[in-house]
Amino acid sequence: MVERRTTTLLDFAIVASAAVVPVLLLVLIVVGVIRPLDPAFQGARNGDRHVSVRQVAALKTFERAIVRRNTVAVGPPTALQLLDGVPQCRAAWDGHLGLLDRVRAALARSGMAPPTPAQRLAAQLADLDDELRRFSTGANPRVSGAVGFDASRWFEAVGEALRLPIEAPDYPGRKFTVQCADLAGAAATLARSNGRMLGMLSWRGTEVARVISRWRPEQFVEISARQVARANPWRGLPGCIFMGNSAASADTPVPAYFVTGPRAPEAELCARPEMFALAEDRGRATPPTGIAGEATPDLPVDDERWKVPPSLEVMLQSLSTLRRPSGSLYRMYTDAAAVQEDTATGYRYGPNRIDVRGSPIDVGFSVDLTIDPSVQELAQKTVACYTGRQDVCRALGMSRNEDAGRALGHRMLERAMVRMAAVAVIDVASGRIEALAGALSPCTRNEYDGPGRGAGCDKRLPYAPRYRPDALLNAAVFHDAMPASVIKPIMAEAFLTDPEVGARWLAAERAGMRNPGTPAIDSLRGQLMRSNSARFLDRMFCADQGFAHCERPWRVQAMAAAFGWNGGCATPRDDCGKRDLLFGRAVDVEDDSGGVAPLATLVPFGRLLAEPLGGKLDGPFRLRPAVALDSGKLRACAAGADGQRPSRDDWEKCRGSVVDVVVEGWGQGQARASALGVAGMLASLAAAANGQLEVHEPHLVSALHGIGTDGSSSLQSAVSRFGLADAQPNRLSRDAAEVILSGLSYGHRAGTSRLACEQVFDPRSCKNIDWIAGKTGTPSFPNDDRSLDELWRLCGRGGAKTRAEQAACGPLRPYKWYVAAYRTERGDPRWTKVIGVLTERNWIHDTGRIHGAGDHGPNPAAEIAMQVAGRHAGFLPEHGH
């Protein structure tokens, strides 16, 4: 008898494994087969994929199928119409199940036949047509007319796409053919998530004319690879964006916040000590707090994103080649195998990697911002309040005395005090930009983000809505306007340092400073505080010497350069008057190591007494040549229309060759500045008054750095040409700067900013405030004396006939300026901060008149500056009670 073999543990393991394998296979089939067959999960099958050449080609077939809705010949097709219209895809879409499909259906046991590919595609096309209707007919649509899906045109486009091979520049010599699965995937992509992708496409009515000129006459939409591309997740993680300082008393700053994207690994990375702290400080450093995104118009009041400047991603765009491991410069600096001569700088950083769960990951270089998160939050909330966010006003406890306890700006359209507000705050000693805030009222935003105006917006406004994405960017740096009287500090510095009269005028002003009380009306300080433009023009055009042999206009022009304006204007350039936002460099600076221009984000800053080449406004600008001015024409211009001097119309009616230069003396004509530019201008003056011998130009980035691992080299050596611009000698006179700021310090006491001050503080306080010194400015506006009803009759119904009437219907907007230096340290006589504010005035609801016509009424830009500076300096409570 054969002895029965004893069952071992190995036998049990083999049997168990054999039993487990079918179970695992069943689980895989359930997850991969049954779950997708459930209608609740059908959308998940069309998850985001990396864009392929075939996918883009399939998406572009819809460019011909999306047409004006009243011209649709055949609407969304049925499944049978799809099979007939695209016979090449009948086998793929008709629903005849193969072996695997039959197994799936059997395992699903849903009791009903699963939808065929043709049925799913027909449902998706019907959904797409519904979303097109909603997208093109809702409030403020992004397209110029109602659009729909035309199946017959799509069938034609699909037939060509399936028949004709396509080529792609990225794959030279290779040809691709669109597949039926690509077409189904394209339809699913467009219909997914309630048509979310439609808002990312280029539409007729929102794209600029230059782009639309390439389209077919009947084309309404364009789809490109750029709009549907997805970043490669295997190329590493972008560097961090740090700001703030949580260790103010320590020798080495530690960032308080970092700005992150939506990916969780980015937030985890930026909280690691290697990313922000030196090796010796890591044990003591507090990790910074992550903020996902930047400020947007509809943020909740308590959201942390108020601390991040709007449009920050655009501002830092030029650094993406270093911040992202996929960037070409990142690769050149971190490729250890390359030789030094491969790059213009000859520097190498070496690998910039960090260990993530046991694997080395490439990480882009990180950016340290100069933004002060608390000041940025205060400034951004203030401009939001003044552009209509009443919930923000209440949270800040922000009010105006004129509103008498009611909502701030309640008398205005939209209950918004202004239609646009931009604020820049600069630290005087360091040139660090501490805040860049910008906001638009909802109806102003409508005028720039699409072809329509919201239903609640006043149709009488004289500006036709059109898509201008540049106007939606942060106005503190991307928007400029005629500077008007805020150029007077530049002019005054030129007067007080004039080789002929400067010493005498300066001595008289300093003698006047020793006398208490408001400056005399005929003094330079008195003319500054009252913004007496006529008397300033007298000085500029040498009325003291009979207007003859006058060189002062060209000294004013040269002085503008000493204030940081007119950069790049020596020769004709498109970027005349701009400046690098990131590191404070001039536009025409070159790298010392070989003529390579540094990475930069060029933004409007300031230009004065420049002219377009050949008189073409869209051409490059250059400095006006210093020519002799006709003294007779100057004398007639100075007398004005009534021919009398002095009188109220002095310098207001000029003719002949001097007109363009005189207009620039008003701060108008071709003169332009941004909120950042006027703040930078006054920061130079405040630095001179403080006795600083050197000045740093305004800059947003304080440093670029890699991972602080032991033995790693400093990024400073690798990319020094992308670093902060060197400090420059201060070219302004300290004595003159003190005189000018003394005059400006009386503006809120008895000058042009008094009424604005009395909206924020009480009148007695305004007379005693000595911690702020500012200058107002009001560019010309042709409709100060017209109501919205008059403008509607004139502009809305084509009634403009004369040149003056056409100007009234033109693009000029009613701006107000204010720029001021202020002190944040009590007991310290130095000016510590400068704030520049640009606003677009609003119309009064009941009268239809523009608020603050001319120099009448409180200046809202000055109000905003005093609201911010008063809280920053501790003279107003920071939050409501």
Image (cartoon, rainbow, N blue to C red):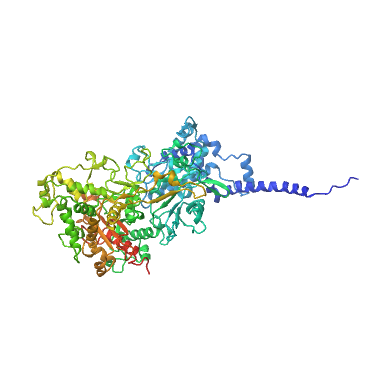
Up/down of 88 relative to 844, above or below? above
Pick the front one: 609 or 439: 609
**Is the C terminus in the top left, top right, bottom left or bottom right quadrant?**
bottom left
Let me know if residue 681 appears in the view: yes
Drawn side of residue 171 relative to residue 848, left or right: right
- x%, y% of residue 822? 30, 61
Pick the front one: 722 or 179: 722
Drawn side of residue 358 relative to residue 124, left or right: right
Pick the front one: 259 or 685: 685
Drawn side of residue 318 relative to residue 811, left or right: right
- x%, y% of residue 566? 26, 46
State which quadrant residue 375 falls in.
bottom left
- x%, y% of residue 556? 21, 49
Q: Residue at x 72, y 47 (%)?
A: 17
Residue at the outermost right position: 1
Q: Residue at x 40, y 46 (%)?
A: 317
State which quadrant residue 865 falls in.
bottom left
State which quadrant residue 587 falls in.
top left
- x%, y% of residue 246? 44, 59
Q: Residue at x 19, y 54 (%)?
A: 496
